[in-house]
């Protein structure tokens, strides 16, 4: 399974998981790097229901997942972009 590296940042008690290419921009806005996170591109994600996927997103500290549909959550969690 392939793994994608992301970076966890924090500011004013809030946490985000961001792509490494955006870390500098976040730091300029006052975010502080907490550490690296590896996200597995797990084929079992596609077998999860929406509530399970939202739980995974929450555990990873990802924001904005609450109104997403299954396909959007899968794209987000697998680190893929729809083309």
Image (cartoon, helix red, strand yellow):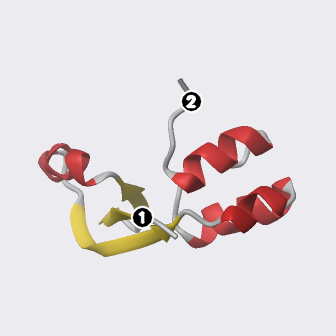
Q: Is residue 24 visible?
A: yes
Report whether 73 appears left or right of 52. Answer: left
The residue depicted at 56 percent of the width and 54 percent of the height is: 78
Q: Residues within 10 Å of mark 2 (few under 14, many from 20)?
A: few
The location of residue 73, given as percent across then percent down, is 67, 47
Residue closest to the eye, 29 or 44: 44
Q: Is residue 68 visible?
A: no
Q: Quadrant of residue 59?
A: bottom right
Viewed as shown, does residue 23 lie left or right of 63? left
Are the residues flagged by discs 2 and 1 in contact, CB closer than 8 Å? no
Q: Which residue is mark 2?
A: 82
The answer to which image quadrant residue 13 occupies is bottom left
- Precedes in sequence: disc 2 or disc 1: 1
What percent of the width, then of the height, locates residue 60?
Answer: 53, 68
Q: Secondary structure at mark 2?
A: loop
Residue drawn where x is 34% and y is 64% of the image: 5
Whether residue 75 is situated above or below residue 78 in the rendered picture? above
Q: How many marks?
A: 2
Label 1 belongs to which residue? 15
Q: CA distance from mark 2 to mark 1?
A: 25 Å
Quadrant housing residue 25: top left
Question: Residue at left 51%, top 35%?
Answer: 81
Location of residue 34 in the rendering, given as x and y in whole percent from the top left corner: 27, 74
Q: Which mark is residue 44?
A: none
Element type where label 1 sits in the image: strand
Q: Is residue 3 left or right of residue 77?
A: left
- Pick the residue in front: 54 or 2: 2
Query: Which residue in the rendered view is the most extreme toward the top?
Result: 83
Q: Nearer the viewer, residue 67 or 44?
A: 44
């Amino acid at each position: 399974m392939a793994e994608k590296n992301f970076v966890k940042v924090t500011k004013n008690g809030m946490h985000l998981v961001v792509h490494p290419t955006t870390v500098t921009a976040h730091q300029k806005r006052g975010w502080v790097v907490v550490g690296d996170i590896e996200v597995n591109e797990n084929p079992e994600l596609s077998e999860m229901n929406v509530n399970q996927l939202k739980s995974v997103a929450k555990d990873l500290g990802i924001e904005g997942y609450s109104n997403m549909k299954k396909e959007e959550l899968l794209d987000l969690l697998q680190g893929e972009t729809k083309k």
